[in-house]
Image (cartoon, grey):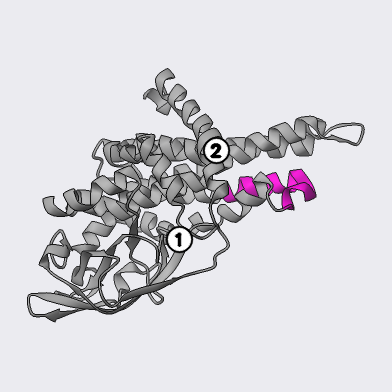
Amino acid sequence: MAGFALGVDEEEWCGQLRALSAGRLRPLAEKGEPGRVNRPLLAALGELGLLDKVFDSGALELCLLRESLAYGCTEAETALALQGLGAHPVLRSGSAEQRERWLPGVREGRLVAAFALSEPGAGSDAAALALEAVPDGAGWRLHGQKCWISNAPEADFYTVFARTGESPGARGVTAFLVPADRPGLGGEALDMLSPHPIGSLAFDGVPVGRADVLGEPGQGFRVAMETLNLFRPSVGAFAVGMARAALDATLTHTAGRTAFGGVLADLQAVAHRVAEMATRTEAARLLVYAAAGAYDGGSPDVPRRAAMAKLLATETAQYVVDHAVQLHGAVALRRGHLLEHLYREVRAPRIYEGASEVQRTLIAKELYRKGSVG
C-alpha cells in the first residue's frame, strides 16, 4: 500500500461493500427497532461472511470494512463492530473451551456479544473501575454496575471487567466472560440520541469461576487495551465512512440546488466549504490507514497512532456532517433524511472507546515519553 493508496482489488472490494450495505443491509436495518439488537441484521452479516472478517482480518482490512459499511448503513457497521468488540477478548485471551463455545455463534450472527467496561463512575477513567469481584470459594461473586454498554441488556454474553484486588489501579482488574443467564445479572435499556442498543447492567452476586476468566487474574486491563488499540483506528474508519457519505450527499445537493441565479456550487463560499470538508476527510482517512498499517506491522507506536486516528477522524466527521446539514438547509433536519440520521450518529464516536480529551492526553503522554515525534 505505497503512500497509503488502495490497490484496485481493495477499491473494488470497498465499492462492493458500499453497494451491499445500501442494497441488502439497510432495508434490514430500517425494519429494526431503534435502540434494540437487530438479530435479522446480525444473521445477514453472518451469512455474508462479514462477521468472519472481523476476526480474521488485519487492522487495515477491518478499517476498510467498517468505513465501507458505514457509508451505506451505519446500523450494519455498528452491529458488526459491536460483535467484534465484545468477542475479540475471547478470541485473543479466551481458553480453547471459551472460544469453541462462543465464537462460532458470534461469527454466524446467532449469538450477541458485548464489551462491558464503562461504569456510572468510571467512563473515561477506565482504571477507576468499581465493579467488585469478591472471592467465594474457588471463584468470585460480582457486585456492582456497568453503564453505557452496547448491546446490553440483550446480549447473550458479556466481556466484563471487574476489580479482583491483586493491586490498586489498572493492575487489579480481571476480565471475565459472563453468560447473560447467570443468576444475579440484570439490566435495562437506555434511551439514547443514537439508535444503537445501549443499556446498563446490574450485578447482584453474579457467580464467576476460574473457567470464566479471560487471560489471567489481574491482567484484565491489558485485555481491554489490546482490544481498544485494535478497534480505535476502526472507530475512525466508521467516522470516515459517515463523513464520506455526508460529503457525497453535499456534492449532489449543491451541484443541483438553484439559488441566487445559479446553483449553490457556483457560490465561492459554498465551493470553498466543500473543498475544506473533502480535504479534512481525506486527511482523516489517510491517518486511519496509517494507524491500521502500524498495528498490522507491529509498530511500538500503535497506542499513539491509534489515538491520533480516532481523534482526528471523529472530530472531522462531526465537522463534515454539521456543515453538510448547514449547506442542505431545513430539508436535512427532517426526520428520516440521511443527514438527520448521520447528525445523530456522528456525535457518539467522539465519546465512546475513549473520548477526544482522553485521546489527546494519551497522545501527549506518548510524545513526552518518547521525547520526539519521529
At 48% across and 35% down in the image, what residue appears? Answer: 68
Report x, y in % for residue 65.
42, 36
Residue 288 appears in view:
no
| Amino acid type of the residue tagged 2 in the rendering | Gly
> Observer-nearest residue: 274 or 373?
274
Q: Nearer the viewer, residue 17 or 285?
A: 17
Q: In the displayed structure, would residue 152 be above or below residue 85?
A: below
Which quadrant of the rendered structure holds the N terminus?
top left
Residue 44 picture location, percent across and down:
42, 40
Q: CA distance from mark 1 to mark 2?
A: 25 Å
Residue matched to label 2: 72
Q: Callout 1, which amino acid?
A: Ala
Q: Nearer the viewer, mark 1 or mark 2?
A: 2
**Dot 2 alpha-carbon crowd within 10 angstroms: few under 14, some 14 to 19, many 20 or more:** many
Q: Is residue 324 left or right of residue 151?
A: right
**Secondary element type, mark 2:** helix
Answer above or below: position of 120 versus 88.
below
Q: Nearer the viewer, residue 249 or 323?
A: 249
Residue denoted by label 1: 355
Which residue sits at x=68%, y=49%? Answer: 336
